[in-house]
C-alpha cells in the first residue's frame, strides 16, 4: 500500500485543530500541570516528531522536544531543518504544536518561542502550556483502507448555488466515528466544515452496504510519496444506528486481523 504523508500548512488548506474546537473536544483537555508534564516527559522519552504550526497554519516546521527546564515551567525544542522557518517561528505570535504518542493525538499552543542554547546547540524554548489536548478515543480505532483496491463512497453534495453534485470517492480510512475521503483539489472546494452528506453509501467488502449520514469536520492537504496532491476530507458519522456501527467495527476487526496474519506469515 502506498504511503501517504499529511502535509500541514500548505497553500491549499491550512489545518484545522481540535484544540481550537473547544465545544467538541473540551472533555479531552488536560488542565492539571502534573498531567501535562507527564505527557511532555513521555514525548521527550519517546523522541516523537512534533509539528509546529504558525502563521495561521500556513507555515510549519518539524522538531523534537529535548528537555524540560529545572523548574518545569519551560520546554526546549530542537531547531527545525529550515533556517527560514526557524526565523519565522521566532516572530510568530501563536504557535500550535501537534504530535502523536502511542496513537493518541496531542495538541497544545504557546504564545511565542524564543531561542536558547541546549548542550551548546541553538534551540527553541517555550512555556509549558496551561492546557493540553490529549485526544484518546480508543473505541474509534482508525483503519487505513487499501489504496490499490479502494473502498468507494457514493454521496450527493450541494454546491453553493444549491445544485446537486453526485460524487464517488475512495476512502482513505474508516473508524467507528467516521471516514476520511480522498478528494481531488478541484473537487475539494465543494466541501466545507459543517456540510452534511445524507444517505452516503459505501460497500464494505464481505460486510454489505453501509448507508450513513456524514458531517464534514476537517480538511487537510495531503502529499503522497509520489508527489501527488489531494485533500483528506474528514467526516463524522451522524447518529449511526448500532447495527451499522457493528458492521463497521466488524469490518475493521476482520481487515486488521488479516493484516496482522499476513505480517506474522511474512515474519
Image (spheres, helix red, strand yellow):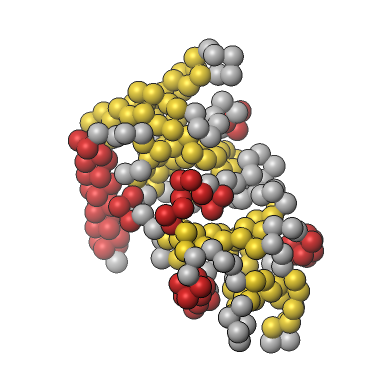
108 is higher (above) or lower (below) than 122: above
User: In the visual, does 232 lie left or right of 94?
Assistant: left
119 is higher (above) or lower (below) than 124: below
How many numbered callouts? 0
128 is higher (above) or lower (below) than 261: below
Residue 222 seen by the camera: no
Measured from the top left, where is residue 192 in percent x and y?
55, 31
Residue 249 seen by the camera: yes
What is the quadrant of residue 221 in the picture? Answer: top right
69 is higher (above) or lower (below) than 114: below
Residue at point 79%, 61% (across, down): 91
Depth check: 235 or 142 in front? Answer: 235
Q: Quadrant of the C terminus?
A: bottom left
Residue at point 61%, 86% (across, down): 70
Measured from the top left, where is residue 142 in percent x and y?
37, 49
User: In the visual, does 26 lie left or right of 122?
Assistant: left
Measured from the top left, where is residue 120 in percent x and y?
73, 86
Residue at point 53%, 12% (across, down): 163
Residue at point 48%, 21% (across, down): 157
Measured from the top left, where is residue 46 in percent x and y?
48, 74
Depth check: 227 or 161 in front? Answer: 161
What is the quadrant of residue 219 in the picture? Answer: top right
Amino acid at each position: 500500500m502506498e504511503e501517504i504523508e499529511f502535509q500541514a500548512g500548505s497553500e491549499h488548506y491550512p489545518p484545522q485543530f481540535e484544540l481550537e474546537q473547544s465545544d467538541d473536544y473540551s472533555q479531552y483537555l488536560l488542565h492539571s500541570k502534573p498531567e501535562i508534564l507527564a505527557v511532555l516527559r513521555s514525548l521527550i522519552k519517546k523522541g516523537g516528531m512534533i509539528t509546529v504550526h504558525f502563521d495561521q497554519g500556513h507555515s510549519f516546521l518539524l522538531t523534537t522536544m529535548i528537555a524540560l527546564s529545572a523548574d518545569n515551567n519551560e520546554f526546549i525544542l530542537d531547531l527545525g531543518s529550515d533556517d527560514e522557518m526557524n526565523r519565522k517561528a521566532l516572530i510568530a505570535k501563536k504557535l500550535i504544536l501537534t504530535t502523536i504518542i502511542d496513537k493518541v493525538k496531542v495538541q497544545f499552543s504557546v504564545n511565542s518561542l524564543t531561542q536558547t542554547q541546549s548542550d551548546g546547540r541553538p534551540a527553541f524554548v517555550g512555556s509549558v502550556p496551561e492546557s493540553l489536548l490529549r485526544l484518546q478515543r480508543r473505541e474509534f480505532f482508525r483503519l487505513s483502507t487499501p489504496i490499490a483496491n479502494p473502498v468507494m463512497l457514493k454521496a450527493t453534495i450541494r454546491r453553493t448555488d444549491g445544485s446537486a453534485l453526485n460524487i464517488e470517492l475512495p476512502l482513505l480510512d474508516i473508524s467507528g466515528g467516521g471516514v476520511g475521503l480522498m478528494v481531488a483539489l478541484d473537487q475539494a472546494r465543494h466541501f466545507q466544515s459543517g456540510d452534511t452528506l445524507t444517505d452516503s453509501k459505501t460497500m464494505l467488502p464481505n460486510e454489505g452496504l453501509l448507508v450513513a449520514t456524514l458531517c464534514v469536520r476537517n480538511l487537510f492537504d495531503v502529499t503522497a510519496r509520489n508527489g501527488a496532491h489531494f485533500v483528506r476530507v474528514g467526516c463524522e458519522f451522524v447518529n449511526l444506528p448500532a447495527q451499522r456501527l457493528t458492521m463497521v467495527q466488524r469490518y475493521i476487526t476482520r481487515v486488521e486481523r488479516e493484516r496482522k496474519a499476513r505480517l506474522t506469515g511474512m515474519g
